[in-house]
Amino acid sequence: MRKSHPIRRVVLATAATVSGVVLLLSLKPASDPGAAAAAGGAAPQQTAAAQESAQGGAQAAASGTVTGDAAQTQYGAVQVRLTVNNGKITKAEAVQAPKGGQSDRITADAVPKLNQEAVAAQGADIDAVSGATYTSGGYKQSLQSALDKVKAAEPAEGSSQGSGDGSGGAQITRTVTGKAVQTQYGPVQVRITVSGGKITEAEAVQAPSGGTSSQKTELAVPKLNQAAVAAGSADIDSVSGATYTSTGYQQSLQSALDQAGG
Amino acid sequence: MTTTLAGGRAARRQTMRRIRPRRSPATILLIALWAGAAGVLWLWWHNTPSIADNNSRILNAGRITGLLAGYLMALVVLQMARVPALERRVGSDRVARWHAMSGRYTICLVVAHVFLTMWGYALQAGKSLGDIVQQTIDSINQLPDMGKAAIGTGLLFLIGLVSIGGVRRRMPYDAWYHIHLMTYAAVFLTFWHQITTGNDFAVEPTAKTVWYGLYGTVTALVIWYRILTPIRLNLRHRMFVEAVIEETPGVVSVLIGGRKLHRMGAEAGQFFRWRFLAPGMRFSSHPYSLSAAPRPDMLRITVKAIGDHSARLRELTPGTKVWAEGPYGAMTAQRRSRGKVLLVAGGVGITPMRALFETLPGAAGDITLLYRANSTQDLALWDELAAIADERGARLMYAVNSPDGERPDISADSLRRKMPDIDKHDVFMCGPNGFAQSVYEALRGAGVPARRIHHESFEM
């Protein structure tokens, strides 16, 4: 029955908790050392899809769309898609960019500039947009990887066939965007690349963002993309903890498939 | 004297038992508690690749405090699940203090978690700390299960508020107790947002399973030990009031009859939570110690009229049905480590000491009882104690105020003078906190090691 010292105990508990939390937070690195590896680990599905589209597009890489590997930045992934026509970049766009809160503004500001620069420079040698250093860095990295893929597919140029959105004619590779489906946390919209009747790539061009939604989108969307490619249909499982997003995704995917089929 | 329960066969048999000390599992449980907390922190560490700016620092501090609060919340409920290992081996009083301490700490963590998370979200949305209230409302509207969580958190704060010492003392015990029972609702309501919005549980299905396991186990233990076990106990033993006897002014004994009462596993030094099914009393249960070793047909409690409930005990009529939960309490013969024992009782704290005095194993001269009271008229159960002392060859001493009101001298010196071998004793103590504190210091001064002073206190 030692004497109790309530005040001392309160002070000790508070000090221990605060310093413990601060210590944990400060021990975490500012940038993710595993990011490169993680990007490598997360990329296969995209890489595979991109390669498949490059090959499946009947040696179409010199003309068509190529998607670079996703580059991880500390605010989220950046992934660039190029539309190439006869070896020239005619269009650059970001299919993934940091989202949520502040990032939304920066992305909205920087990505169009970076897209323009990429088309103008016809290469990865572009200037970073000030105020969006991380996004610019990720953009350049993903752009470079897309360019590498274009180059890899170059020898097949002779027999290439045109493809891409609305280019008409006998399309082998086609990109179709489903309708945006409203969920409780925001719209979900899926874009698929269909090649030879197969889904070679699936991605969400819109997904819930902000607060927890950003975390969940980051978690669920890659899985759903992968599932869509694997299933070749809209019959995919929901990602647990992201039920609404999953449902929206399935609906948008179905609408994209309907368009591709018709 | 009709109330004398000394000399029962069961009691006599107990005095012949071997001394088998059992260690309290408290240390192991505390290690498990800290290991669990470390596991929770590891989960966060594992799922957080990097922290870039102040915004994510704030959000992650919110996550850490949230995870810890969720973990502790389960333990706070577990501590009140009346698990026998906790109640009978660690000791109900100690577990109750743990419960109060971790409850307070959990509420502080919840406050920090709510504040930090909402601040972080506000920053993420490009707003400032000033918009935290608006952000909270937005989050409650937009995120899954946050409405429930908000109600649960409100309840938790209310429960925390009424448990603050000053507020609690001004409230009737029953009102406080029933508000406190809402903790279950609060824990249930706040649980779901942890699973649906908690980053670590969304990312890590294993973590989600473990979390369900933790809360599921606690729920099962609460249902088993707080609901099913008492129902079974009372259906089996069917207790009722047999007689109420006034021992001394203001102190009554209640004799409780029933079936096969020796099969309840109660030991001297333990208590039950009693609920007397009489008008005005059926909605509150109170802990009273057994004041005699249990007999197959009879239990006895001895109570001093301090509060409403204890004052009304004298009006109980024979035949009143009794609902009891227990036995609880760890201050039993198994706490003792050696041959000689000193029992110290202050006032009505005599009740468990009286039962121990009768049943503690020991030869003549091994057991001593020191009984402190205001006057010789207040020495409840004295005749019984004298009879037991006679029969067992035990020592019985009392200390009362002198006629002019002066307190008796219980100090290291006086104890050593009376009992030169006091440092060879295990000491069991029961009495008001102030009394226990001063005796504790005197005993330590007389050379009794702290680990051999056994004390039960229900004052927080």
Image: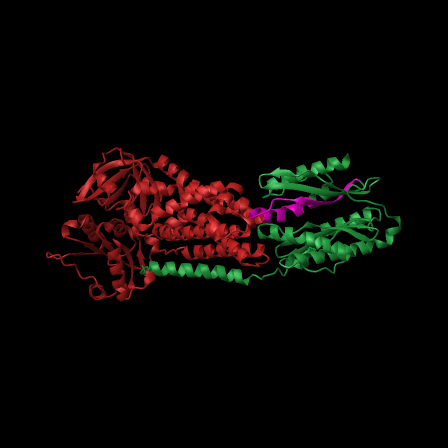
Chain colours: A green, B red
The total of numbered circles placed on residues is 0
Magenta stretch: residue A221 in it?
A: yes
Residue B194, x across and y down, in percent = 51, 46
Q: Is residue B228 left or right of residue A146?
A: left
Q: Is residue B3 left or right of residue B332?
A: left
Res. B40 in view: no
Q: Quadrant of the N terminus of chain B?
A: top left
User: Where residue A80 appears, x then y in whole percent?
Assistant: 72, 52
Residue B45 percent coordinates (x, y): 55, 57
Using the rendered view, name the quadrant where residue A190 is placed: top right
Residue farthest along the left direction in this orientation: B404
Q: Residue at x 27, y 63 (%)?
A: B441
Quadrant location of residue B21? Answer: bottom left
Answer whether residue B103 is magenta in the image.
no
Residue that lies at the very extreme toward the right in this rendered image = A158
The image position of residue B66, as x and y in percent, is 49, 51
Q: Is residue B212 left or right of residue A1?
A: right
In-front residue for pair B408/A249: A249
Quadrant of residue A259 within the rendered picture: top right
Instruction: Decide which of B376, B437 is in the foreground and name it.
Output: B437
* Residue B160 in view: yes
Please, is residue B196 above or below residue A143 in the view?
Answer: above
Could you tell me which residue is drawn at 35 percent across and 36 percent down?
A: B234
Front in this rendered view, residue A146 or A11: A146
B265 or A156: nearer the viewer:
A156
The boundaries of the magenta stretch are A197-226
